[in-house]
Image (cartoon, helix red, strand yellow):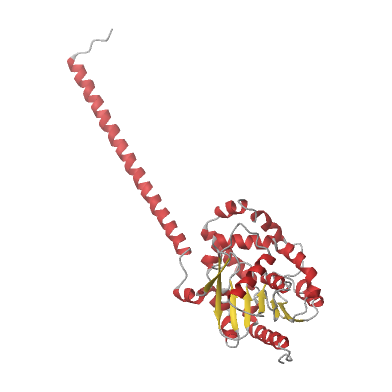
Amino acid sequence: MFPFVTKRSAAKAGRRQAAQVRKSVKAATKTVKAATKAAQGAMRQAESATQALVRAAAPAPKATQRAQAGRFVTVDGLRVHVIVRGRGRPVVLIHGNGTMAEDFAICGLIDRLAARYRVIAIDRPGFGRTQRPRHRVWTASAQAALMHRVLDGLKAERPLIVAHSWGTLVALAMAAEPRHALRGLVLLSGYYFPEARADVSLAKPLALPGVGDAARALVPNAVNRAMAEQSFRRVFRPQPVPARFVSRFPIEIAAGATQLRAATEDAATMNTAAGLLQRHYPRLTLPVAILSGDADAMVDAASQSTRLHGTLPESSLKILPGLGHMIHYGARTKIERAVDAVMNTAAGRPPAP
């Protein structure tokens, strides 16, 4: 059944098989070494990429951390971050979309106003260091109610509200609440009437629970950071982004998942909020100062600020030539004068010249 093989032939065949095995082992060892070297290179590249992302998301420098230092006011279990400086009649600062209370510290408005007022800058829900629970829809009116509760906790009676951009909707919603008296409003680069806007349309699908979270999760942190820096250039245009903003603004918070979700949700509800509030405008009798830049690339001053001035019975209007959206950097002195004028009017004194 089996072919006959001599002893000498068997030995020769065994030597050939052994040589082939050694050759195969040698080739396999060489392949393993090459694969190991490639894997080590890939691991080094991955480690470098990881370190780059860690550096991008690193904590802010100590100087920035000191500037951000504030306190928390808890309302129904929600921790709201506030920066409180100075003494006297209360002035409340409400920031716009995509930024936080620290913005008012960087531009110098907090320190300047704190020389004569008690200044309270508040991080709106989901921005800065304030939480944004998902079980509640954070409309402008809902945020206004939260602001009133925070101010009650701080015993800030009859505050004057200074609000920027999206924050002006919150300020007007606060003024529309008759149970809480305000001294007046100073509205900066605000949005007051619904308009057809591409950013609102684009934000709506991303504001949907689950859908927006999944979309944002696909974007690397480094890309979010780059997009945030690009948006800063747009909101400051035609002015350059100030060096102090670049060095001090906590971009790691602004580009984080919570604040990106908050910014998307607020953008998606902007027209709805303005549409619901505009019926209250003719009934507002408190003093209001409206300021806007005529070179604003985000909000048209004529269709928004000028129109609001014609609607509010007790308002003044200043259109600032050559300035963009972030007028609290380029026109801080004019804003201080507007605060003083509204304070004097509320106190029954004539405005300062």
Q: Is 205 drawn above or below residue 91 in the view shown?
A: above
Counting from the top left corner in percent of width and height, residue 46 is at 42, 53
The residue sitting at the left extreme is: 7
Asked whether residue 50 appears in the rendered view, the answer is yes
**Camera-side residue: 321 or 283?**
283
Q: Which residue is painted at 72% across and 85% down in the image?
A: 346
Residue at the far top: name it. 1
Task: Tell me the quarter of the image containing the C terminus.
Answer: bottom right
Residue 76 falls left or right of residue 291: left
Which quadrant holds residue 109?
bottom right
Q: Quadrant of residue 237?
A: bottom right
| Residue shown at 70% from the left, 81% from the top | 183
| Front-lying residue, 277 or 236 | 277
Residue 297 spot, x, y in % from top left: 69, 70
Pick the quarter of the image with the N terminus.
Answer: top left
Q: Position of residue 119 (x, y in %)?
A: 59, 81
- Count of all numbered marks drawn on residues in the image: 0
From the viewer's perspective, is 54 left or right of 276? left
> Residue drawn 56% across and 61% down?
258
Specify whether residue 241 is in view.
no
Q: Is residue 115 above or below residue 297?
A: below
Where residue 52 appears, x then y in whole percent? 45, 61
Quadrant of the image occupied by residue 321:
bottom right
Height in image: 33 above or below 250? above
